[in-house]
Image (cartoon, rainbow, N blue to C red):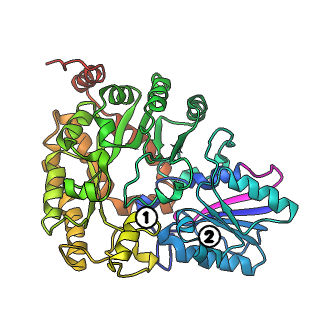
């Protein structure tokens, strides 16, 4: 059987392949996992439209396409194309889960929720000639999943091919979180076995790893066991966590000692009323300054996430948030416009209030305002969002933020990471399009690891919970 798996580009552009670096960082691990369930006799191809042009001259028997909200129209276009060519088309992913009736118009079978149990069930049904039109996830376990088909991934086209997902979901349920609805109806969070994760890591080349889990620290026992296993492996790694995890000394010390070099954290807002309204209670009462200090003391860089446009926000929120991040010496910041994704409680609430302005899914990219804000106009929100990005990533801001660092080498590391990420995005795009991006990985590892003798002494003491030497 000829099987084709596609990750369509997250864009409304005519040529989706020409995308910024952020869309070309990581390979489509979900599709690589699904490919692992297929027979050795099957001819399987994975294509990611973010890093390559799709081959549309083929005639596969089975096509599986992963859908996000901003790729929905492209997904439907490709699905209709392959159905017209006689292929059996399967659609799954976040958008399919939240808009199953819409997706089913373009598919032979749809998959709602995680597919670890439903995809093998479909393959059995398909082989027997009676596949169902819809598969709904209810069983949640990673105990018997097959190895990822990394051999099908074009690793040379990604900056971080050594990416992993070792858990699913998140125990928190924030109103605006798109993925919360994906795991509804079953376990909201579950993990792999640590021994299996370590075995997978041991087989990966190079030093750098990137955990794509929504919250790697969510299960404290699992995280501590994982970090213990990572110690001594000589790995450098990045992940996503919470402000509460960053204030857990034992957890943070073990993470840093095992190679943690950069952490994505959802600060989201500096306003407690916003946190309460969005049910992000895990951030309430937390000292954000302390969180930043704890991470930086251990040599961990921060990618801070902020969301603009919550109901307690005023037009002053953009400048005050960017200024706080700059003054804290935060290395990279990701700003978003609040987006009421379909299937979320936020969407339900705003729809009931008549505040949704459009259901054009191309605009649900956190760069456009698709609802009526409470204390500003939609145009003010979009303009402020762009101003926050411009302010944070100005060279003057980058240099001012670097001066917060405790030593020259840390400041240089800040400049290389922050400036290299945003100021040379066109270069990253060129490297991806020419297939040369893999040659930059040793440089990334050096930037992540770079610490001088005095700084290493400080970090060693911090990771052991001891006072730093003078």
Position in image of residue 251 (x %, y %):
36, 29
Residue behind mark 2: 54
Which of the labelled discs sits on residue 255, or is there none?
Answer: none
Q: Mark 1 or mark 2: which is in front?
A: 1
Q: Say which element carries label 2.
A: loop
Q: Which residue is mark 1?
A: 344
Question: Could you tell which of marks 1 and 2 lies nearer the N-terminus?
Answer: 2
On screen, 140 above or below 204?
below
Crowding near the residue tagged with mark 1, few <14, some 14–19, many ≥20 C-alpha atoms within 10 Å: many
Horizontal placement of 292 versus 146: left or right? Answer: left
Q: Tell me where residue 145 sits by quadrant.
A: top right
Specify the quadrant that holds the C terminus. Answer: top left
Residue appearing at x 31%, y 31% in the figure: 248
For residue 352, which quarter of the picture?
Answer: bottom left
Q: Where's residue 50, x and y in %?
A: 52, 64
Q: Residue furthest right?
A: 128
| Mark 1, secondary structure of its residue | loop
Residue at the image position 19 percent from the left and 65 percent from the top: 313
Decide if residue 347 is on the left or right side of residue 226.
left
Q: Is residue 154 visible?
A: no
The range drawn in magenta is 37-50
């Amino acid at each position: 059987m000829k099987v084709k798996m596609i990750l369509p580009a997250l864009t409304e552009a005519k040529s989706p392949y020409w995308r910024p670096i952020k869309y070309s960082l990581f390979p489509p691990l979900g599709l690589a996992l699904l490919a692992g369930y297929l027979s050795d006799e099957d001819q399987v191809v994975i294509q990611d439209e973010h890093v390559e042009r799709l081959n549309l001259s083929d005639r596969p028997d089975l096509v599986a396409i992963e859908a996000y909200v901003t790729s929905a129209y492209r997904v439907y276009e490709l699905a209709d194309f392959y159905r017209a060519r006689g292929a059996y088309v399967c659609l799954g992913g976040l958008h399919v889960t939240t808009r199953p009736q819409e997706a089913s118009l373009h598919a032979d079978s749809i998959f709602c929720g995680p597919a670890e149990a439903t995809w093998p069930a479909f393959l059995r049904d398909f082989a027997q000639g009676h596949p169902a039109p819809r598969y709904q996830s209810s069983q949640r376990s990673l105990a018997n999943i097959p190895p990822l088909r990394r051999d099908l991934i074009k690793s040379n086209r990604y900056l971080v091919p050594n990416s992993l997902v070792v858990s699913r979901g998140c125990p928190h349920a924030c109103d605006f979180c798109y993925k919360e609805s994906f795991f509804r109806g079953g376990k909201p969070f579950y993990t792999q076995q640590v021994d299996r994760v370590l075995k997978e890591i041991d087989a990966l080349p190079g030093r750098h790893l990137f955990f794509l889990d929504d919250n790697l620290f969510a299960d404290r026992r699992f995280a501590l066991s994982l970090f213990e296993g990572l110690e001594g492996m000589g790995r450098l790694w990045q992940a996503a966590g919470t402000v509460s995890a960053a204030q857990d000394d034992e957890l943070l010390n073990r993470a840093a000692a095992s190679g943690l070099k950069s952490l994505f954290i959802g600060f989201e807002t500096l306003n407690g009323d916003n946190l309460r309204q969005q049910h992000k209670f895990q951030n309430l009462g937390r000292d954000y300054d302390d969180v930043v200090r704890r991470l930086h003391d251990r040599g961990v860089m921060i990618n801070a996430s902020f969301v603009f446009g919550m109901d307690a926000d005023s037009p002053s929120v953009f400048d005050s948030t960017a200024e706080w991040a700059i003054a804290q010496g935060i290395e990279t910041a990701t700003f978003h416009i609040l987006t009421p994704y379909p299937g979320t409680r936020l969407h339900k609430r705003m729809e009931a209030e008549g505040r949704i302005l459009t259901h054009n899914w191309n605009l649900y990219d956190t760069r456009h305002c698709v609802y009526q804000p409470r204390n500003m106009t939609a145009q003010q929100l979009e303009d402020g969002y762009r101003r926050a990005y411009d302010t944070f990533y100005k060279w003057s801001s980058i240099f001012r933020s670097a001066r917060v660092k405790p030593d020259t080498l840390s400041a240089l590391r800040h400049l290389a990471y922050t400036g290299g990420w945003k100021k040379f995005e066109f270069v990253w795009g060129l490297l991806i399009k020419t297939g040369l991006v893999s040659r930059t990985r040793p440089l990334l590892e050096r930037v992540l690891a770079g610490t001088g003798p005095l700084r290493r002494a400080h970090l060693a003491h911090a990771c052991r919970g001891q006072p730093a030497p003078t």
